[in-house]
Image (cartoon, grey):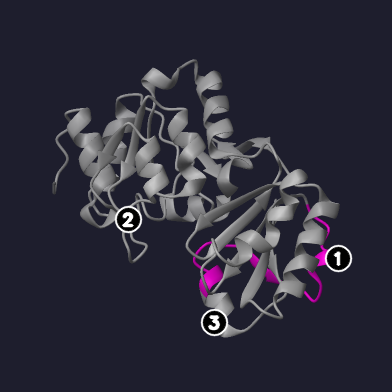
Amino acid sequence: MDGSLLDGAKRVHPTFWPLLDALLARGVTVAPASGRAYPTLRRTMGRDDLVYIAENGAHVVRDGVAVAVDGLDLAVARDVVRRVRGAAATLDVGVVLCGERSAYVERTDDAFLAQCTPYYALLETVDDLTAVQDTVLKVAVHDFGDAEAGAGPALASFGDVARVLVSGEHWVDVMSPTADKGTALRAVQAALGVGPEHTMAFGDYLNDVGMLAAADWSFAMANGHPDVRAGARFLAPSNDENGVVRTIASVLRLDVPGL
């Protein structure tokens, strides 16, 4: 989604909607895959006849029903929250505890909430994140600086018990060790009876690497992370050039109004 399908202003290009209709009419399964929460993806797409790979693969929903949940150990999630609280002495960071029922924050300043609200359609303010009782899908940490240099290294030691992933310039996700967009995509492929040779995937950042490896038709966005571009088989125009829609329409030879 972000950096791939959505443009720099976080908008879906108008030509995507007729393309989506054409794909579904041809029996193609469409699966928005994102670090965003399922309610946010569902709000953006506005329909249930899709497969949603949410929370970087920790939550998979098909036809409006959750079919896979790969949660993070609650004790580990609470330790991550405490670690970020400590890191806040030197880093400008905030935490989103991403649960199955809702997302939760304890930092409430306008600057931090402005970074969270686009990604979480359900966001609840609590006094203490370590007291939340919910299935934790991931802990998302926003670093107002460079996440690869700041929050990422600060959380790296959790790599023994969790998956620590820099998922954007300012975001680090801490998830179950087995949660990944690629793992989720392979599960979807198995359920549908298709293989990598029948799968096209688009990505721009490090949290997309596993997903691209599960698709023979793997496209890195032209403006994507260098490691993503190096690992993909093909290159698509940037998200600000409507690269996803243009590439799908070209490969499948679809006539999309407005292109």
Residue 6, picture quadrant: bottom left
Q: Looking at the image, is mark 2 or mark 1 earlier in the sequence? A: 2
Percent x, y of residue 168:
49, 58
Rendered view: 259 above or below 151: above
| Residue ID for mark 1 | 131
The prevailing secondary structure element of the residues shown in magenta is loop
Q: Is residue 33 visible?
A: no
> Amino acid under label 2?
Val
Give the residue furthest to the bottom.
Answer: 109
Q: Mark 3 against mark 2, which lies toward the viewer?
A: 3
Residue 136 lies left or right of residue 10; in this view the side is right
Query: Could you give the CA–CA distance between mark 3 and mark 1, rounded to whole angstroms?
Result: 24 Å
Disc 3 designates what residue?
111
The percent coordinates of residue 249 (x first, y second) are: 21, 35
Q: Is residue 161 left or right of residue 219?
A: right
The image shows residue 124, relative to residue 46, as above or below, that is below
Q: Is residue 219 visible?
A: yes
Alpha carbon distance from label 3 to label 2: 24 Å
Q: Are there few (<14), some (14-19), or many (20+) residues within 10 Å of tag 3?
A: few
Q: Which residue is mark 2?
A: 12
Query: Which residue sits at x=80%, y=76%?
Result: 127
Callout 3 amino acid: Ala
- The residue drawn where x is 47% and y is 43% is 208
In the image, residue 118 sits, relative to residue 230, either above or below, namely: below
Q: Which residues are magenta?
A: 115-134
Q: Nearer the viewer, residue 96 or 16?
A: 96
